Structures are given as C-alpha cells and as structure tokens.
Amino acid sequence: MKKKYSMLLLTTVLLLSAALPVSALQDTAPDLTANKINVIQIPGSSLDPQQKLDYASGINSIVKGLDLNLDTYRFIKKPEASDYFTKISNSAWYSEAFVIAQIHGLDIPKDITADTIMTREQFAHLLSQAIQVNEDYSTINRYNTITDEDSITPAYTSSIQNLLNLGISLLDAKLNFNPKSPITRSVAAGWLNESVDATKNLKAQADGRPLQEYALSTKTIDGQVTEVEVSAQAPHAGYGLRISSIRYDQAKKVAVIYTEVVQPRPTGMYAQVITKVRDTAYIPSGYQVKLAVADPNTNTETTATDSGNVSK
C-alpha cells in the first residue's frame, strides 16, 4: 500500500514561464557525477562515465537506488520477467529489477530488450514514475521553460516537469533537455543521486522534520567567549534555523543548545533547492557544547551532536 504524504509548504500555483531553480541547470563538466556513478550497477563491467546507458542498467539502478521492492506483496506464484516481457530473461542479473518495476507500474515496453539504449527522456520518465511509487509527493505545480520542449514525447512532458520542480539538474545552460539523445551513465547517476536526496527531504518535511543533517561547530573568539554555530540542510530557502535557548550546567561545564525551525511564509514560493541554514550564539569559554534537536511529534529533545571541547 502506498504511503501518502502531502507537503505542508505552499499553495499549489501555476506559473507560466517561471524561472528555473539554479539546481535545474546542469553543469556542463562531462564527468561531474563520476564520483557518484556507483549507483549505476553493472556487474562485471567497468564504469565508463560517458558510456551510454542501456535498459538493463537503467532499470536496475532506478529500482535499487530508490529502494523499490515487493515486500508488501504476496504472490501465489513468484512473478518472473517472462510474465511481463517477451525478450527479458528470467535468470539475468537485472531480471528481478524489471519485475519490480513492472509491478509498480513503470512504463516499460513489453518487447524491450535489455541492451536497448535509453534516451534522456525515457530515463527521466521512468525515474519520475519510480519516485512516486512509495510516496505521493506534491510539489509546486510550476511550468518550467524548456527550449527544445517541442522535441519531447508528449507522454513524457509531465514527468520531466515533475523532476524539474524537484530541482533535478536536467537542462543545460541554454535550457535545452535534448530528449532524444542517449543518456550517459554519468548523467543518469547525477539525476538518480539528486532524486534520492530530494525525496529524503520531501519525506522529512511531510514527517514534520524539514531540517536534516544538523551540525555544530565552535570557534574561540578570545579567552572568555566562544562562538557556537548550528547549521542544517533545508529543502528550500524559505526555511530558517534559530537558536531558541541555551541551558547551562555549571557543575558539569556543559552548555546545551536548543533550536527551532523557522517556517516558510505560507504565501511564499520557493524553488526546491537544498539550502544550508544556520544561526550563531556566543557562550562563555570552557563549556562543552551539546546540540539538542526537538522531536516535533513528542515535544521532547534529544542530544544530537556533541562538540566536545573542540574549537574551530
């Protein structure tokens, strides 16, 4: 059963010819994502970032990368690839991924062959569908300008717009998507990694935990004062972080930092771009600093980060 999440962020608004978020513009460096290319899983094959991606690797990577599975399904007979596809082996390393993708409703042609090269629009369409399998994500319903939109297969347009609204880097500096071009392993890895990060942040927002990856750093100003900075990753620039209070335990020489989330304006419109937010406070020197993060569901705090006595 699909879990339903809704973003409590913005009223859905349709903007014609809206400006794209910065993250939707793809860096032109050819091997930008080569360091993350391990998400493209190809047994026994060297990972050449510029090699074209075939359906076997593409489907397997999407399924594994987004953790699609059949854990909640019960079958009288174990499903096999040949139940759904005419040219996909039941015993290949990618067979299970094709079965999982098909059962979850991804649009894969019945007569596809594993070595068929994926185009950019085909991979984007399947990636967008996979994102929606476990979570019903709602995003800003914004129309993003694509210079070569007329070249996109109409059935894929909505999926491509959805990925752009998630902040996935699909376009080049001239806002071209090049839909019919083969997708390389490097580009596919970049889109997949960005999609994983985007969905984690959207789920955290829906769960009432919009800020993630809290970090604490300290810096000695002089012999009497220490600067304390708390930072976190926000799903967009509308969120903020505020140090709400500091509790001192003078006997143990411990200072516990409490924070609160600054919510975005209800009428604001923000590109879904991961943003670092931070706040700074000053405490007497000599204290060990701990960060307490409030649990929004229980109104209790847990100590999340301990700075020790380290100064930076």
Image (tube, rainbow, N blue to C red):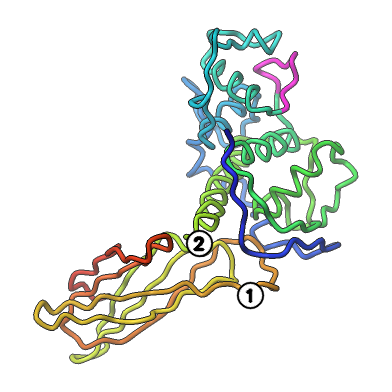
Q: Which residue matches tag 2?
A: 210
The image quadrant of residue 95 is: top right
Q: Secondary structure at mark 2?
A: loop
Q: Nearer the viewer, residue 112 or 288?
A: 288
Residue 115 is covered by the magenta coloring:
yes
Label 2, label 1: how far apart the Cα atoms are = 14 Å
Residue 5 is covered by the magenta coloring:
no
Q: Which numbered disc flags the more N-terminal residue, 2 or 1?
A: 2
Q: Secondary structure at mark 1?
A: loop
Mark 2: amino acid? Pro
Q: Position of residue 157 (x, y in %)?
A: 81, 43
Quadrant showing the N terminus:
top right
**Magenta region: which residues?**
107-116
Q: Which mark is residue 83?
A: none
The image quadrant of residue 267 is: bottom right
Identified at 59% across, 46% down, the residue is 195
Q: Residue furthest right?
A: 150
Q: Residue furthest front?
A: 298
Vertical placement of residue 65 versus 25, above or below: above
Q: Position of residue 252 (x, y in %)?
A: 10, 77
Q: Which residue matches tag 1?
A: 265
Q: How many marks?
A: 2
Q: Residue furthest left?
A: 251
Q: Magenta stretch mostly in which secondary structure?
A: loop
122 lies left or right of 50 = right
Vertical placement of residue 16 versus 77, above or below: below
